[in-house]
């Protein structure tokens, strides 16, 4: 039988106030425990930032360059990603369930690259998101697009479902090819996503005024990599974004289409988590590239 508890052996430390620490992510302090715990699986609490590896492109592009064989090209990179962003089809078929970082599931879809892209609808139920242990669900928002209202409605429905289950919602600002990608547009699109309840927002970096985009958005922002550019330029973009207020990157093509994807993702980590300058990160990339050649 266990010893009886004795009053004399207890120490309540009555003079020490109860610990009450603010949560490390902007705009997330009032969220419920489960949601915060999932966010801490997306963003590294020690840097407050994330390197999300995005390879959900197939949901409208099919087997695009670098994603023909996700088992061969992406799975070896997952050890360096804080979070994976993918579709449920690829998660179930190809990603080992031993991966313990955050999973951000693509939750909208519909039209292929051959059709009007803004015509997306929700493409994931909350039960599936829970079953697949998603940390967040991602939905495309086409501010200024042909189906703007429909995509906003997708976002708000997902926020309602996600908040109930404690799963974050990532609002993805999708910019049409005919639209101007400037700070004014990004401020509008990111702020609309945040106002309507997105837990965090993905957008594109702009050279002029990105700090105002980040400042005007009350929740964390991550930046997409966009089209493949030379490694130095992608590292410069990532550096500008985090130094001007982004909480990390959600990068796809500039990693998996790089000449050396494993060196590139490690160099991006240095910029995002350790504030490496672009030239330092590029040197690091070159060193790793030559080591693995
Ligand atoms: C596709 C997406 C991608 O995940 C996003 O654009 C990030 O990938 P990339 O760095 O290649 O732009 O949301 O719609």
Image (cartoon, rainbow, N blue to C red):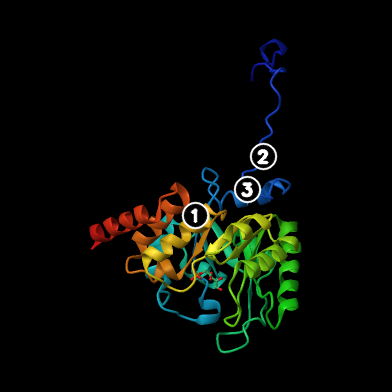
Residue 69, relative to residue 291: is it above or below?
below
Residue 101 appears in the figure: no
Q: Is residue 52 visible?
A: yes
What's the distance in space between the residues labelled 2 and 3, CA to CA? 9 Å
Q: Does 112 sit above or below residue 172?
A: below
**Dot 3 alpha-carbon crowd within 10 angstroms: few under 14, some 14 to 19, many 20 or more:** some
Residue 4 locus on image (x, y percent)? 68, 16
192 relative position to 100: left or right = right
Q: Position of residue 96 (x, y in %)?
A: 46, 61
Query: Residue tagged by mark 1?
Result: 82
Q: Which residue is mark 2?
A: 22
Number of residues whose C-alpha sits closer than 10 Å to that of mark 2, classed few (under 14), some (14–19) or many (20 or more): few
Does label 1 point to a residue whose CB lies under 8 Å from ligand 1?
no
Residue appearing at x 61%, y 52% in the figure: 39
Quadrant of the snapshot with the C terminus: bottom left
Residue at screen point 69% across, 78% down: 144
Q: Name the residue rendered at 35%, 55% in the picture.
A: 279
Disc nearer the start of the sequence (3/1): 3
Residue with the mark numbered 3: 25
Identify whether 223 is placed above or below 67. above
Residue 138, image quadrant: bottom right
SS type, badge 1: loop
User: Are the residues at dot 2 and dot 3 in contact (C-beta closer than 8 Å)?
Assistant: no
The reply to whether the C-beta atoms of the residues labelled 3 and 1 are less than 8 Å apart is no
Q: CA distance from mark 3 to mark 1?
A: 15 Å
Q: Residue furthest bottom?
A: 114
Q: CA distance from mark 2 to mark 1?
A: 22 Å
């Amino acid at each position: 039988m266990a010893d009886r508890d004795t009053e004399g052996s207890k120490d309540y430390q009555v003079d020490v106030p109860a610990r009450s620490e603010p949560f490390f992510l902007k705009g997330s302090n009032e969220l419920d425990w489960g949601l915060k715990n999932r966010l801490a699986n997306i963003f590294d609490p020690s840097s407050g930032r994330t390197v999300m590896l995005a390879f959900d492109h197939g949901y409208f592009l099919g087997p695009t360059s670098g994603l023909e064989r996700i088992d061969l090209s992406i799975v070896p990179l997952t050890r360096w990603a804080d979070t994976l962003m993918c579709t449920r089809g690829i998660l179930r078929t190809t990603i080992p369930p031993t991966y313990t970082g955050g999973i951000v599931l693509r939750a909208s879809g519909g039209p292929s690259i051959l059709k009007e892209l803004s015509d997306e609808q929700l493409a994931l139920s909350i039960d599936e998101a829970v079953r697949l242990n998603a940390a967040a669900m991602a939905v495309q928002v086409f501010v200024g697009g042909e189906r703007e209202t429909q995509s906003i409605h997708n976002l708000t429905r997902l926020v309602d479902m996600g908040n109930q289950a404690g799963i974050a919602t990532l609002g993805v600002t999708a910019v049409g090819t005919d639209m101007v990608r400037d700070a004014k547009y990004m401020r509008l699109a990111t702020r609309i996503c945040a106002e309507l309840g997105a837990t965090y927002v993905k957008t594109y970096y702009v050279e002029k005024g990105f700090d105002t985009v980040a400042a005007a958005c009350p929740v964390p922002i991550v930046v997409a990599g966009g089209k493949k550019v030379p490694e130095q330029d992608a590292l410069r973009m990532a550096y500008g974004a985090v130094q001007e207020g982004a909480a990390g990157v959600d990068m796809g093509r500039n990693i998996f289409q790089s000449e050396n994807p494993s060196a590139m993702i490690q160099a991006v980590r240095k910029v995002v988590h350790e504030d490496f300058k672009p030239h330092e990160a590029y040197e690091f990339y070159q060193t790793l590239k030559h080591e693995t050649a």
